[in-house]
Amino acid sequence: MTALVVALIAGALVGLALGALGGGGSILAVPALVYLLGFTPAAATTAGLIIVTATSLTALYAHARTGGVRWKTGALFAAAGLLPAAAAGAVASRLPQPVLTAAFAAVAALAAVSMLRPGRAGTGPGARGARPAKAAGAGAGLGALTGLLGVGGGFLAVPALVTVLAFEMRAAVGTSLLVISANSLASLAARGATTTGVEWAVIGPFTGAAILGAWDGRRLGAKVTGALLQRAFAVVLLIVAALMLVDAVT
């Protein structure tokens, strides 16, 4: 199978995840770039940010058209993560590749476990009103994660928006795309020159397929129950985490 075909298939899956779940695209994109397309972990995180930024902005537009984005609250949540994203992005290029791989595997595993737990939407502190300090802390943590690992953080942003800020699921998915876009752009700006070595012949088709997949993912998310999508995605994450952890320690 040629690199172009692999990039198109992987890109479509990444877009479906972002469009349907409001996150998770980058945590699939980076392993695909490393294990299917031969990127180094450092190059994959930079390429992943490019893919996720373009795809998230497109998906954000689609959700905004249907009123699924809380702009003011989402902007405040995202703003807290901009500086951490930029700082972590500058540090990421200096870390050993096995460390990046192991860290990515750990985050993927934790995200999968949290997604498999019974949902508690509306029962956490956010149900009694948003707490600005907790929202800022969650936003800063997501920003740092974006910069370090090349992930948009949407797979963590959606649960945070639901439990901390008491968003309904539809608004959380749309608003998380605003957070992902802002964090990814900040991290890319911090990486700067590292984008010059990106293989655009692969990243271009990958991104194009992801953008198209995001539109289909939004429609899929409206038809399939969120719980089913979440469980399926969590299983995929556990498999990816196990493979990456084995690779990091061997």
Image: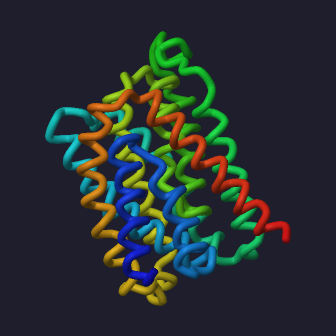
Position of residue 213 relative to residue 140, above or below, is below
User: Residue 44 in the image: x percent, y percent?
Assistant: 54, 74
Position of residue 177 relative to residue 87, above or below, is above
Q: Nearer the viewer, residue 192 or 132?
A: 192
Position of residue 102 relative to residue 116, above or below, is below
Q: Say which residue appears at 41% left-offset and 74% top-offset.
A: 7
Q: Nearer the viewer, residue 42 or 144?
A: 42
Q: Say which residue appears at 46% left-offset and 27% top-offset.
A: 227
Most distant residue in the bottom direction: 197
Which quadrant of the figure contains the N terminus?
bottom left
Most distant residue in the left direction: 65
**How many numbered marks are there?**
0
Which quadrant of the figure contains the C terminus?
bottom right
Q: Say which residue appears at 32% left-offset and 29% top-offset.
A: 170
| Horizontal relation, residue 203 to residue 125: left or right | left
User: Residue 157 in the image: x percent, y percent?
Assistant: 48, 40
Q: How is the image coloured?
A: rainbow
Tell me if I can see residue 58 in this picture: yes
Q: Say which residue appears at 33% left-offset and 62% top-offset.
A: 210
Q: Nearer the viewer, residue 148 or 16?
A: 16
Tell me if I can see residue 87 in this picture: no
Q: Nearer the viewer, residue 29 or 76?
A: 29
Most distant residue in the front direction: 1
User: Residue 70 in the image: x percent, y percent?
Assistant: 29, 33
| Horizontal relation, residue 54 to residue 90: left or right | left
| Horizontal relation, residue 76 to residue 69: left or right | right
User: Residue 182 in the image: x percent, y percent?
Assistant: 38, 54
Res. 105 image quadrant: bottom right
